Amino acid sequence: MQAPADPRYAAVQDGEYLIPAVNPAFLTPEKVRTEVAYSGPESPNTIVVDPFTRRLYYVLPDGRAMRYAVGVGPEGKAFRGNARIGMKREWPSWTPTQNMIRTQPELYAEYASGLPGGLENPLGARALYLYRNGRDTYYRIHGTIDDRSIGRANSAGCIRLFNQDIIDLYNRVEPGARVKVRTEAESREYEGIWVEDANGEVHPPGTELPLLVASAG
């Protein structure tokens, strides 16, 4: 049974681009952005990424946070610790890393010089660029053209959100904002041990599903 349509994920005209609506089948309760209670130690205006539960929190005042579902690529799995938002870009251009070009030239070699922003760009409608000590980490929080990937471990990319959600987050965050990416131990402390189903999606502790395998979180 499909989830009811959510107007926050309807098609939206954004400048010259019409962002498609998100398929209602992807808008499960775990995937729609929701304001929730937050018990972590981070101060308001901090972004907290949990790559193990595939969630992102934007910390609000008074023990609250806005929670978003994310997809996590290899770079997102490898990054841990603190950073700052060094840049924000609307409809950013994208250039594959040298490692991506070297290991999968059939997919990425043609984009070695970069791909302009737009509806076909894998960074989606917005991107937040993470810096450490004034240097680009090449880690991004961004939109996506593949809504199906949200809530899953992806074959490429860093941390991706529905385009409608990255626009919402982008509008809240200022350059210089702190970003915290949780370790596995921190994820377990605050979220418990999540489980992954046969489709590659994760679920909260206590979820009973067939063909479960242990999640990394």
Image (cartoon, rainbow, N blue to C red):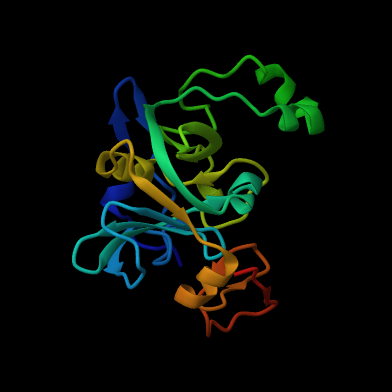
Residue ID at (57%, 77%): 193
Q: Quadrant of residue 61?
A: bottom left
Q: Is residue 56 visible?
A: yes
For this view, does 196 lie left or right of residue 16?
Answer: right
Quarter holding the C terminus is bottom right
- Extreme-top residue of the structure: 113
Residue ID at (65%, 41%): 156
Where residue 215 sits in the image (x, y, percent)? 64, 71
Q: Eyeballing the image, is 108 above or below 208?
A: above
Q: Quadrant of residue 103?
A: top right
Residue ID at (42%, 66%): 30
Q: Quadrant of residue 33?
A: bottom left
Which residue occupies the foreground of this view, 146 or 213?
A: 213
Which residue occupies the foreground of this view, 157 or 33?
A: 157
Residue ID at (62%, 53%): 77
Where residue 126 sits in the image (x, y, percent)? 40, 33
Q: Eyeballing the image, is 123 above or below 9?
A: above
For this view, does 163 lie left or right of residue 209?
Answer: left
Give the mark count. Answer: 0
Which residue occupies the foreground of this view, 15 or 2?
A: 15
- Extreme-front residue of the structure: 133
Q: Eyeballing the image, is 43 above or below 168?
A: below
Where residue 18 sits in the image (x, y, percent)? 35, 28
Q: Is residue 10 visible?
A: no
Where residue 171 sits in the image (x, y, percent)? 26, 39
- Extreme-left residue of the structure: 62
Q: Eyeballing the image, is 149 above or below 215?
A: above
For this view, does 37 lie left or right of residue 217?
Answer: left
